Structures are given as structure tokens and as C-alpha cells.
Amino acid sequence: MPDPAFCISLLTIELMIPWARSLKDRRSAVRGLKDRLRSRFNASVAEVAYQDKWQRAIIAVCIIGNDKRDLESNMSKIRQLCEEAQDMQIVDVRQQWL
């Protein structure tokens, strides 16, 4: 059986939540964004850093597919959705192909 061809794209997004005054505020904002990304893009999403900081978070978004152009399009839409989130600001975005 031949090896299947597929691509994996990983997007790491550093966020600033300036209005958050507690971990509960931050978790609420991050959870909402993670849920939107999961439901709209069927992506794997995890908070990977700054779990103990009130106003910062880093999330990782991973999608897998067999068409690199589709993945590139979806990652662009994911970035746009994050940029449109009015309750947080993007500090840094990094994309990797695995």
C-alpha cells in the first residue's frame, strides 16, 4: 500500500487580552476563540503557554489535509478570524509546515 500524501500546518498565535483583570477573564476570552476555531475549521487548538498570566496567551492551531492550497487558505482565514476578535490583540503569528 502506498504512503498517503498529506500536509500538516501549525499556526502559533500570541495574544494580548488587555481588559482581563483575572485568569478567569483571560480563560473566558481564550476559550471563546478556541471554540470558534474548532467549530469553523475542524482544527486542533490548544493553549500552549502563559496559562498563569492574566493578559497573555499563546494558542497553537493545527490542521491536516492532502491539499496544501486548501490548508493555506484555511490558515489565512484562521488568522483573519483572530484579527477580527475585538476583545484581544495579536502580538505574534508564526506558521510552520510539518
Image (cartoon, rainbow, N blue to C red):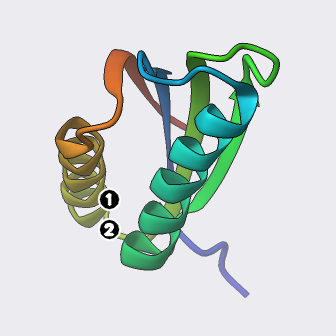
**Image position, residue 72 (x, y; %):** 25, 51
Q: Secondary structure at mark 1?
A: helix
**Left of 91 or right of it: where is 7?**
right
| CB under 8 Å between discs 2 and 1 | yes
Badge 2, how many Cα within 10 Å: few under 14, some, many 20+? few
Where residue 88 sits, quadrant-wise, is top left
Q: Residue 92 or 70: which is nearer the viewer?
A: 92
Q: Which residue ends up furthest to the bottom in the rendered image?
A: 1
Disc number for residue 71: 1
Q: Residue 95 or 59: which is nearer the viewer?
A: 59
**Left of 32 or right of it: where is 21?**
right
**Left of 59 or right of it: where is 63?**
left
Q: Residue at x 26, y 43 (%)?
A: 85
Where residue 18 sits, quadrant-wise, is top left
**Image position, residue 12 (x, y; %):** 51, 29
**Image position, residue 13 (x, y; %):** 46, 27
Residue at the disc numbered 2: 67
Q: Say whether residue 2 is visible.
A: yes
Q: Residue at x 37, y 75 (%)?
A: 40
Q: Amino acid at mark 2?
A: Asp
- Image quarter hosting the N terminus: bottom right
Q: Amino acid at mark 1?
A: Leu
